[in-house]
Amino acid sequence: MSADSDFLKFQFNSALASEAPGRIGIACSGGGDSLALLRLAVDYARENGVELHCITVDHGLRSGSDAEAEGVTLICQGLGIPHEIARWTNWDGQGNLQDEARRARYGMIADFAQRLELDLICLGHTSDDQAETVLMQIARSAGVDGLAAMAPKRDHLGVTWLRPLLQTRRKDLRGFLLEIGQEWIDDPSNEDERFDRIKARNILEALAPLGVSTEKLCTLAGNMADARHALNQQVWHFAGDVALVQEGDVLLHRENLMRGHFETRRRLLRHALTWVSASDYGPRQREIMNLFKAIKEERTATLAGCLIAIENDRIRISREFSAVANLQTAPGELWDNRWRLTPNEGDATGVTIRALGEEALQLCPDWRETGLSRASTIASPAAFRGDALLAAPLAGVNNGWNAENACGEKDFFNSLVSH
């Protein structure tokens, strides 16, 4: 193996060394970056006695994607690695396609990781991806958070996500694959300039004569990440005096919140909204400013799929019912990227998990004893067989069912300093 390949292995092993995982998940699409990730992970697992699992998400958005996913299965079989294919079938044609696909992908991979009790999931993002992200964020007039781009490690959806190739160039990964004789798939969408990332990729080449390189953009991202971390450390300390988590809702002490420095309270409020909605992106600054105005005037507001209500001296941030009204999953799967409902025993055939709603709330006479608001309760997950309510654990009707929040109270605070 060449010196370049040895260095790639060293970079990968160094990124994993501090984690000391026993069970690793690899997200692999069959493209060059993720296949190189897989092959490097295989070597690491064999040398360190680590259990490896692989997942491919087939979004089904173009012809041949199913065959590509099956191709990853064959590669994994040859390497002796368990492999699963998760197929996305819930696209309804509404909203931003790439954003919806990304959210679905992370949700399915998180479910895979939690079901197999994996220590972490490795993603194949490279320094080229990092530089492209920074360029796109500059075009959006991003602040510190946007320019910090992707972090090497992040806790999200109850899962630790690691990007061990974030300091590695795409071309070097392909050189490694050529050296070991591993073929990969080139996604035709990587040439489609309808997508901002492809535009950024092509523009980056044109900016080279000005000294705007992948390396310098990654350095910028690193500098901004340091600044973000320092800011978020302040927010973490602030949150200890202001925030409380209750069954997936976030309660903020109104007076203490409004006494904080503007940037500190803005970050905490934005984080609370993002955490409750399990979203990858928070609201824009203008929207946050309008929300602060509503809080000051003690008005109920909605933003980012959340309901923000004033309760005496506290602000309750809960899920907005309309944001989850049409969500359905099977028992044991993540609902709304946060909740997992499972029966202690018995047959769950034909059972769906969906929002409780006003009508079924009437079947939960003790819901007030939970301490949740009415709005929070009707937006909470419940188990139904057809139209019949089986269980609503957050509304006080357990009937042998458990509700687990994949993003618990510790996650709310820890994720303030982990991106």
Image: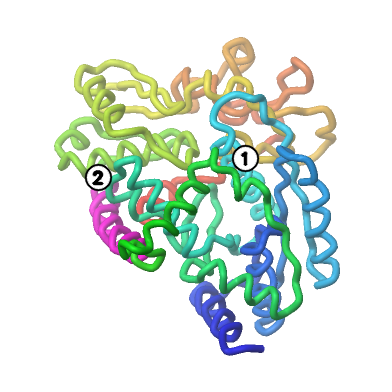
Q: Is residue 272 magenta?
A: no
Q: Nearer the viewer, residue 11 or 309?
A: 11
- Per the model, the C-alpha gap separating discs 1 and 2 is 34 Å
Residue 119 vertical position relative to residue 135 in the rendered view, above or below: below
Q: Nearer the viewer, residue 303 or 349?
A: 303
Q: Residue at x 20, y 43 (%)?
A: 263
Q: Residue at x 28, y 42 (%)?
A: 267
Asked if residue 86 shows in the view, the reply is yes
Residue 318 horizontal side relative to residue 385, left or right: left
**Quarter of the rendering containing residue 107:** top right
Q: In the drawing, what numbered circle is on residue 104?
A: 1
Picture colour scheme = rainbow
Tag 2, which secondary structure? helix
Q: Label 1 amino acid?
A: Ala
Q: Label 2 amino acid?
A: Asp
The residue at which mark 2 appears reads as 241
**Quarter of the rendering containing residue 363:** top right
Span highlighted in magenta in the image: 217-241
Asked if residue 222 shows in the view, the reply is no
Residue 43 vertical position relative to residue 261 in the rendered view, above or below: below
Q: Nearer the viewer, residue 207 or 235?
A: 207
Tag 1, which secondary structure? helix
Disc nearest the viewer among 1 and 2: 1
Q: Nearer the viewer, residue 176 or 419?
A: 176
Residue 160 horizontal side relative to residue 329, left or right: left
Q: Residue at x 69, y 80 (%)?
A: 179
Q: Is residue 229 magenta?
A: yes
**Residue 68 horizontal/vertical position (percent):** 78, 53
Classify mark 1: residues with Cα within 10 Å, few (<14), some (14-19) or many (20+): many
